Structure formats: C-alpha cells, structure tokens
Amino acid sequence: MTPKIISVKIGYSNSILLVNGANSILIDTGVKGDLQQFKTLFNKYNLKPTDVKLIILTHTHNDHTGNLIELVQLTRAKVLVHKNEFENLKTGFTPIPSGTRFYTKVVVFLGRNLKPRHASPEPFIADFTNIANYSLSDYGISGEVIHTFGHTAGSQSVLIGKTLIAGDTFFNIREKIIFPPFANNPQQVLKTWAVLFGMGIEEIIPAHGKKFRVEKAVTEFEKWNKKLKIRG
Ligand SMILES: [Zn+2]
Ligand SMILES: [Zn+2]
C-alpha cells in the first residue's frame, strides 16, 4: 500500500515518517536534540514507538543521523544505510563534503581545517546495508530505496509512487537553492538528477526546505549543467 508521508522538522533537517501501522518506517533522524518531538509525532499518528520497524538513512551526515541511538533504543527498529557509508557510521567519521558555491567553499575550507569532524555522526553499527535498490515490500509498502549518489558516495532516496524523499540530493532553501550547497561529487549529482527526471518523478521532499514540484529542479539542472561544464 501507499503510506501516508509525514515530514517533520528536527532541528534544521526533515525526518520523514512513512505511516503504515505496525510496519512504519522513519527516514533520517534529524539534528541531535529533541527526542520528544519524535514521541509526539508517533502519538499523533497512533503509533507505538515499536511500530517503527525500519530506519533508513539517506546518508551519514550528522544532521541526518542525530538521535539515531536514542531512537533505536526507543523503537527497536533496524537501521539501513548504504554500503558505501556503513564504515563512516561505524567509525563515526564522515568527511565534510565539498562546497559547490563560493560561500560554501569558504565554509568547507574553514571547516576542514578547524573542525574536520563537523559532519560526522555518532558511531553506530547499522543492522544492514544495501548496494542495489531496496524494495519496501517486506513492510507492505509500495516503494523502494534508490541510489542517488553525488552529495555523498552512499546517498540514497526513497521513491513512493512519483514522490521522491530525497535526503540532500535536492535542497529547497532560500527560494532559489535547489542544487546541494555541499556535494562530494557535483557532476554526479547532476547525473543522478537526470536519471530521476527520466524516471518521471513529480514531487520532491528534500531534507532541507519544503516539498516542491520537479519542474523547479529541471530549470536548475539546465543552469548547473552549463556551469559545471564550463568549469570542466
Ligand atoms: Zn548531507
Ligand atoms: Zn543535510
């Protein structure tokens, strides 16, 4: 079945709850801080914490993995991370990605020199990893985890019908910023976008900002395609 998709802002990152009774799924665990927000969220949708059976991490930056340890204790959910980032999570070190704009390049330069662990998660051993796409049919949900590399080497998104729960593969902040301000491989982000457009996605729920229609991203694609080609 198609679950109800609920987005909740935890710090400055969205966590997404796929409401599906005793087989509910949580995507990302926000910025570390307020576990109560999750408890309130589960209550609101008549879920016991243990109804959350799976936590999917779109990647291992710490604004997506905060509260993970506390949430696992609360829900006893299994945790899924892409194989390429299993070690990052295990060791609690994820490198700061590169800036894709002038100001984020400056931020990254300072961060790497002053606070190299800034993006790192708390160490955690995930229950399982995926390499290829991962179907959610075991949870009675029509949808799948798909690979969306570029922001990081193990970035993934969840596709439910024509809605993409995108992690940091798309942003939607300050009106115009759709392309991730930080990315390990900006060219790869664009390749990923092209594949997603080809799949016919219609709606995007980013981890930062509100959901939006894909057309907005297509316009950005043209711009960034030119920009990155010029730079080589
Ligand atoms: Zn990120
Ligand atoms: Zn993020």
Image (cartoon, rainbow, N blue to C red):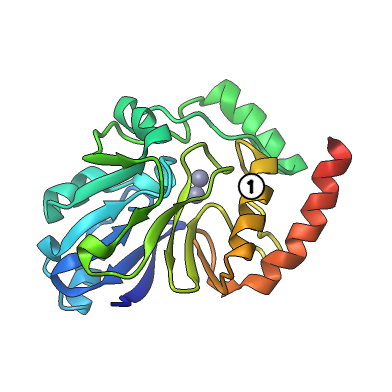
27 or 83, which lies in front?
Answer: 83
Answer above or below: position of 159 versus 64: below
The x, y position of residue 55, in whole percent, is 27, 53
57 or 145, which lies in front?
Answer: 145
> Quarter holding the C terminus?
top right
The x, y position of residue 25, in whole percent, is 26, 62
**Residue type of the residue flagged with mark 1:** Val
Q: Which residue is mark 1?
A: 189
> Quarter holding the N terminus?
bottom left
231 or 75, which lies in front?
Answer: 231
Is disc 1's CB within 8 Å of ligand 1?
A: no
Q: Residue at x 18, y 62 (%)?
A: 52
The x, y position of residue 213, in whole percent, is 61, 75
Q: Residue at x 69, y 70 (%)?
A: 216
Q: Residue at x 29, y 31 (%)?
A: 123
Q: Residue at x 31, y 34 (%)?
A: 122
